[in-house]
Amino acid sequence: MNLLLTIIALITLASAVAAICLRNLVHCVLCLTLSFAGIALTYLELSAEFVGFAQVMVYIGAVTILVLFALLMTRGGKELHLRSWNPGHWLTGLGAGLGTLGVLLVGIFHSKLREVTPLDTKDESVHALGNSLLDTYVLPMEALAVLLTVALIGAALLAMPERSRPGQTFRKVSSTKEGPVKD
């Protein structure tokens, strides 16, 4: 294993642990983004360019931004306050993690894919895929871009406070234990 891959793996693992352990949610999302970037760099280092760039576009470009956007629109990045610390939760999580690791290791070591030798030549699959997306499938790509833009605008409009929405004439309704009370 080369040194660069080892450094990338250590940074990825450290940022994943930090994403779990930090209390500020914005910092957790930023550490998760660093983990996604480390995974993408690992794919790129292993000559899986398409998967690496898809990781960057989908997880860093879309999922992380969506989580950060939703977090800032709802909670404002406040710190988490845990009610009580229970060591049983840590033991349950550790057991689930070790069980998952065991299943993965059994699957890896009993796989017939370990016997396959990798190809020495690189094909032009990423180049061909890019050409087909921008040539043959340009209309579906544009439709998808418009659909995602409209969904983002709709989410932003739904997240706006009620009194600042344009053209709204609703009266504010507050609720009590007995039911809603109109002001």
Image (cartoon, rainbow, N blue to C red):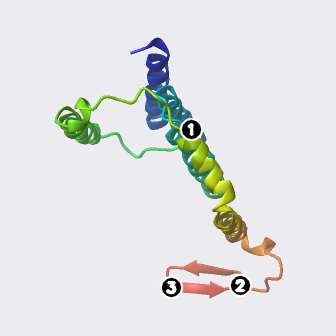
In depth, the one of 49 and 33 nearer the eye is 49
Specify the quadrant that holds the C terminus: bottom right
User: In the rendered structure, which disc, 2 or 3, sits on the residue that comes first in sequence?
Assistant: 3
Q: CA distance from mark 1 to mark 3?
A: 45 Å
Q: Is residue 46 left or right of residue 152?
A: left
Q: Amino acid at mark 3?
A: Glu
Q: Amino acid at mark 2?
A: Asp
Secondary structure beneath label 1: helix
Q: For the residues labelled 1 and 2, say whether their Cβ atoms are less than 8 Å apart.
A: no
Residue 183: image tag: 2
For label 3, the residue is: 178
Q: CA distance from mark 1 to mark 2?
A: 44 Å
User: In the rendered structure, which disc, 1 or 2, sits on the residue that comes first in sequence?
Assistant: 1
Q: Position of residue 1 (x, y in %)?
A: 38, 15
Q: Position of residue 42 (x, y in %)?
A: 48, 29
For label 1, the residue is: 33
Q: CA distance from mark 2 to mark 3?
A: 15 Å
**Is residue 68 among the parts visible in the rendering?**
no
In the depicted structure, whether residue 155 falls above or below residue 127: below
Q: Nearer the viewer, mark 1 or mark 3?
A: 1
Q: Position of residue 174 (x, y in %)?
A: 63, 79
Q: Position of residue 89 (x, y in %)?
A: 28, 42
Q: Amino acid at mark 1?
A: Thr
